[in-house]
């Protein structure tokens, strides 16, 4: 088991170093540290960049930049699927890429078959988005690179102003739908495509409908988007349906972008009211569903913690009561709560030390926290200046590279390498 941990980390590290070579030898990113940072950001689907003028890069380099995130997007899902049989204890069982969350029922009998099905779904959704983006006016090159960016939740764009450059409602709605899908559990999407929803017509509970994480994820997106729409709603009494649609579209775009950790943007949301910015900042700490290409803490962990919180409140009223966590209509294991609590504590502990590292460069408190959240959650987009990474000293960039890989591999797979127990026989 120890060998697998080490091989996984070395594989990701090797990929990030190899991916930096085209950036470095092209001469467009002459600093090797910057080249590694850009490559790491791509493979970990973080989307943070050291580039100031993205459109100055040649198309072949922009395409390579898009390829890194597209490969990294599916890489984490397949990694989790491949490692699951190795971990029955700890927290890895919380990020199962199947339709049953905490239970041992399998998505498919064999890992190899699961990998093929997930890749088929991933490629198919990417191809469909390319066609839709081209239909609404994007060039084929832009459509391909942005589809790679969306489905991987990577956030790299070939335009300096991201999706806002196109000023197209159709393109924005296409990205909204596919960012939402990219943050959704891929195994659940596969079940939908296999026709599992036919049982709804028979009025029987469906695995997708009763999935606790899927319901929470959808609910968060809807509630956050509605609140932000109200917050940025035109205050003029003469507003028309066009302004209403624009507010609704921009709200849904930024909500799906941040919760799926995609990092694309369609408007200058820094000018939005404080209430809207507060909601967006909260979304930075959530992330998408388990079994998705999204980063972050993941919705399933918040579901478990919220259910445990409710049980503790009931225990105050009924001290002798016995309460269990219900996930997907079934009782979950108590050990799951301990794993989630440990993960969340470690997540915020790493955030603290990452922010501390960034602050040593002279960055203010908010920029330090914002940078830490972006890199560890692989969100690529926060509430600060997106071009700030260019100006960090090299030692901070190397530290952020390690943090991006750590966040992408769900913390434990990397941090365990730094413990004495790992190296003892």
Image (cartoon, grey):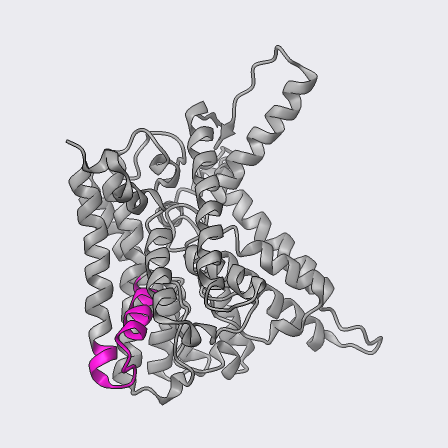
Closer to the camera, 163 or 54? 54
SS assignment for the magenta stretch, majority: helix
The reply to whether the magenta stretch includes residue 29 is: yes
Residue 227 visible to an observer of this rendering: yes
In the image, what residue occupies the spot 51% across and 56% down? 259
Where, by quadrant of the figure, is residue 52 drawn?
bottom left
> Eyeballing the image, is 104 above or below 261?
above
**Quarter of the picture holding the N terminus:** top left
Outermost right residue: 237
Q: Position of residue 272 (x, y in %)?
A: 68, 70
Q: Is residue 209 visible?
A: no
Q: Tell me how many marks there are.
A: 0
Residue 4: give x, y in percent of width and height: 18, 42
Which residue reaches farthest top?
A: 320
Residue 376 appears left or right of 417: right
Residue 119: percent from the left, percent from the top?
26, 56
Q: Which residues are magenta?
A: 22-43
- The quadrant the C terminus occupies is top left
The residue sitting at 60% across, 25% down in the picture is: 311
- Magenta run includes residue 69: no
Residue 122 image point, x, y percent:
31, 58
Looking at the picture, tell me which residue is in the foreground, 2 or 73: 2
At a point 61% along the width and 10% down the height, the residue shown is 320
């Amino acid at each position: 088991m120890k060998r697998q941990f080490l091989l996984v980390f070395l594989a990701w590290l090797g990929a990030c170093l190899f991916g930096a070579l085209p950036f470095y030898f092209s001469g467009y990113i002459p600093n090797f540290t910057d080249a590694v940072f850009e490559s790491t950001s791509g493979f970990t689907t973080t989307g943070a960049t050291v580039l100031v003028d993205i459109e100055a890069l040649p198309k072949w380099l922009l395409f390579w930049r898009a390829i890194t995130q597209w490969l990294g997007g599916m890489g984490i899902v397949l990694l989790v699927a491949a490692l699951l049989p190795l971990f029955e204890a700890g927290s890895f069982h919380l990020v199962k890429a199947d339709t049953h969350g905490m239970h041992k029922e399998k998505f498919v009998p064999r890992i190899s078959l699961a990998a093929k099905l997930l890749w088929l779904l991933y490629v198919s959704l990417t191809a469909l988005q390319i066609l839709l983006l081209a239909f609404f006016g994007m060039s084929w090159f832009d459509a391909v690179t942005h589809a790679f960016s969306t489905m991987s939740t990577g956030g790299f764009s070939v335009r300096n102003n991201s999706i806002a450059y196109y000023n197209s409602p159709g393109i924005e709605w296409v990205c909204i739908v596919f960012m939402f899908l990219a943050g959704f559990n891929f195994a659940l999407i596969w079940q939908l495509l296999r026709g599992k929803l036919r049982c709804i017509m028979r009025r029987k509970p469906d695995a997708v409908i009763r999935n606790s994480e899927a319901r929470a994820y959808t609910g968060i997106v809807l509630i956050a988007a509605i609140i932000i729409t109200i917050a940025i709603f035109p205050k003029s009494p003469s507003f028309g349906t066009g302004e209403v649609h624009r507010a609704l579209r921009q709200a849904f775009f930024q909500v799906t972008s941040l919760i799926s950790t995609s990092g694309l943007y369609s408007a200058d949301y820094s000018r939005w009211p404080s209430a809207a910015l507060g909601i967006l900042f909260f979304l930075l700490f959530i992330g998408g569903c388990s079994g998705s290409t999204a980063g972050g803490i993941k919705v399933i962990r918040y579901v478990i913690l919220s259910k445990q919180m409710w049980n503790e409140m009931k225990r105050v009223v009924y001290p002798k009561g016995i309460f269990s966590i219900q996930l997907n209509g079934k009782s979950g294991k108590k050990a799951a709560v301990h794993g989630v609590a440990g993960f969340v504590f470690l997540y915020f502990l790493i955030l603290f030390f990452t922010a501390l590292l960034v602050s040593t460069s002279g960055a203010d408190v908010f920029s330090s926290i914002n940078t830490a959240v972006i890199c560890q959650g692989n969100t690529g987009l926060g509430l600060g200046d997106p071009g700030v990474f260019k100006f960090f000293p090299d030692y901070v960039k190397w530290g952020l590279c390690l943090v991006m890989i750590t966040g992408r591999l769900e913390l434990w797979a990397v941090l365990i390498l730094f413990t004495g127990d790992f190296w003892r026989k």
